[in-house]
Image (cartoon, rainbow, N blue to C red):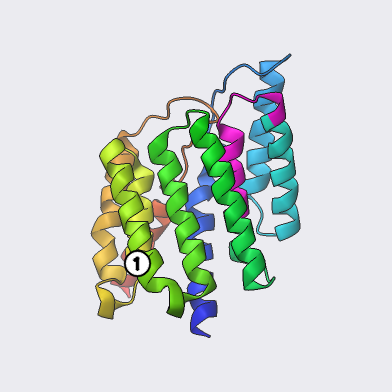
Amino acid sequence: MKKALFTLTLVAASFSSFAAVAQQPTATPAAAGNPDAYTAMMAATIQDLMSTGDPAKLKQADAKLERAAQVAPKDWLPRYYQAYARTITAFVSKEEDETKDKYLDQAEAALAQARKLGGEESELLVVQAYIYQARLSISPMLRSMKYSKMVTETLAQAKKLNPANPRIYLVQANNVYYTPSMFGGGADVAKPLFQEAQTRFTAFKPTSVLAPNWGERQVKGRLKSYETASVK
């Protein structure tokens, strides 16, 4: 039961924080033939990816991203979003734990490809932190000591590279929010982190159109829930 609840909360955090990306305009390197068609294809695929929790549809989006990677082999974004798709597949899949770990192995492989293509490192590290959370959710009792630390260390690396990246603070806030109070976490401890994330989002300007620009919706929703709770 504890495992199911932990997995559910992490899935909720992942879906909420990534949901806004599909709505953001982005630019991408010119693909072979028609860059406008490529951008439209990527935008539609990201929309599909961010609007589903169905493993079959997530895999369909993954396949479309693979085709995009073939069309624009120098663009890191298809591999970045593949890493996300595979991570969420691991969260929502009802398959065996070994199979979920394989999805996460594939997510890490996609992330490594995005890194080789020159992807923005702080953004890659944020997704890496989600992958570690997914690893943890497979077996919280056995993996928490290892992967909780890895999430924290990965976000610290991302912050050193780009302290203005608001997604770092969002993922950090989520990590603290779902950490039991006996281990220094909980909603009250996480609130200042969500507030910091909102401050960072207010100042943030995306670098291009298909570039990562997700997470503000979740921050606003979380802060709204604090307001609602204080009224009761």
Q: Is residue 152 above or below residue 2?
A: above
Instruction: Give the labeled residue for mark 1.
Output: 177
**Residue 94 seen in this snapshot:** yes
Q: Residues within 10 Å of mark 1 (few under 14, many from 20)?
A: many
Quarter of the image where the C terminus is located = bottom left
Is residue 85 a member of the stretch shown in magenta?
Answer: yes
State left or right for residue 38 relative to residue 168: right
Q: Which residue is found at the position 29% from the left and 43% from the top?
A: 159
Q: Which residue is found at the position 74% from the left and 34% from the top?
A: 67
Mark 1 is on which residue type?
A: Tyr
Q: Which residue is found at the position 53% from the left and 26% from the top?
A: 209
Q: Which residue is found at the position 53% from the left and 85% from the top?
A: 1
Pick out the residue farthest to the bottom: 1
**Residue 178 seen in this snapshot:** no
- Name the one closer to the observer, 168 or 138: 138
The region drawn magenta spans: 70-87
Q: Position of residue 161 (x, y in %)?
A: 30, 37
- Name the one closer to the observer, 168 or 152: 152
Determine whether the residue tagged by mark 1 lies in a helix, strand or loop: helix
State left or right for residue 199 relative to residue 105: left
Tell me which secondary structure the magenta stretch mostly adopts: helix
Q: Position of residue 162 (x, y in %)?
A: 30, 36
The quarter of the displayed image where residue 141 is located:
bottom left
Is residue 24 a member of the stretch shown in magenta?
Answer: no
